[in-house]
Image: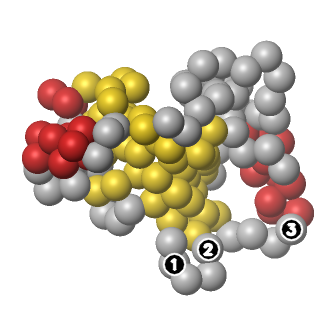
Amino acid sequence: MKLGAFSISLTVKDIQKSKEFYENLGFQDLGGDITQGWLILKNESTVIGLFQGMFEKNMLTFNPGWDQNAQNLDSFADIRELQAELKEKGIKFLTEADESSEGPASFTIEDPDGNPILVDQHR
């Protein structure tokens, strides 16, 4: 199963302080909008998202259709295909993508320890 680009989405209290901290670790701006409370940072192949006031917990994030530089892939498994495959395997969903839709969509699942996993397709 190809889930797309991987990152960790961090819930932060002060996005500016978190940005400065991770920049000191060598992370650089990859995208986002600090005025909206979210930034994407990258250090080599490691990608993190900083999110203030958007999520309750840190979570693993996968983006079908993107590579680690948030560039579109020519070929990828649509999120609805991934969702159907996981349902067949008995995975329980916290949120689901609308199976009748096309394009951007997301779903959320949890691992056995309660760690949230967001699969978020942007195109």
Residue 30 position (above or below residue 108):
above
- Report the disc number at residue 111: 2
Residue 101 position (above or below residue 10):
above
Tell me if mark 3 has few (under 14), some (14-19) or many (20+) residues whose alpha carbon lies within 10 angstroms of its own.
few
Work out how far the residue at label 2 is from the one at label 3, CA to CA, in angstroms: 14 Å
Q: Tell me what residue is drawn at x 24 percent, y 39 percent.
A: 23
* Towards the viewer: 93 or 23: 23
The answer to whether 78 appears left or right of 48 in the picture is right
Work out how far the residue at label 1 is from the one at label 3, CA to CA, in angstroms: 18 Å
SS at mark 1 in the image: loop
* Picture coordinates of residue 36, whole percent (x, y): 21, 31
Q: Tell me what residue is drawn at x 21 percent, y 43 percent.
A: 24
Q: Three-letter amino acid code at disc 3?
A: Lys
Tell me if mark 1 has few (under 14), some (14-19) or many (20+) residues whose alpha carbon lies within 10 angstroms of its own.
few
Residue 112 occupies quadrant: bottom right
Question: Which numbered disc flags the more N-terminal residue, 2 or 3?
Answer: 3
The answer to whether 52 appears left or right of 8 in the picture is left
Residue matched to label 1: 114
Query: Residue extending furthest bottom?
Result: 113
Q: Three-letter amino acid code at disc 1?
A: Gly
* Picture coordinates of residue 60, whole percent (x, y): 52, 57
Q: Tell me what residue is drawn at x 88 percent, y 63 percent.
A: 88
Work out how far the residue at label 2 is from the one at label 1, CA to CA, in angstroms: 5 Å
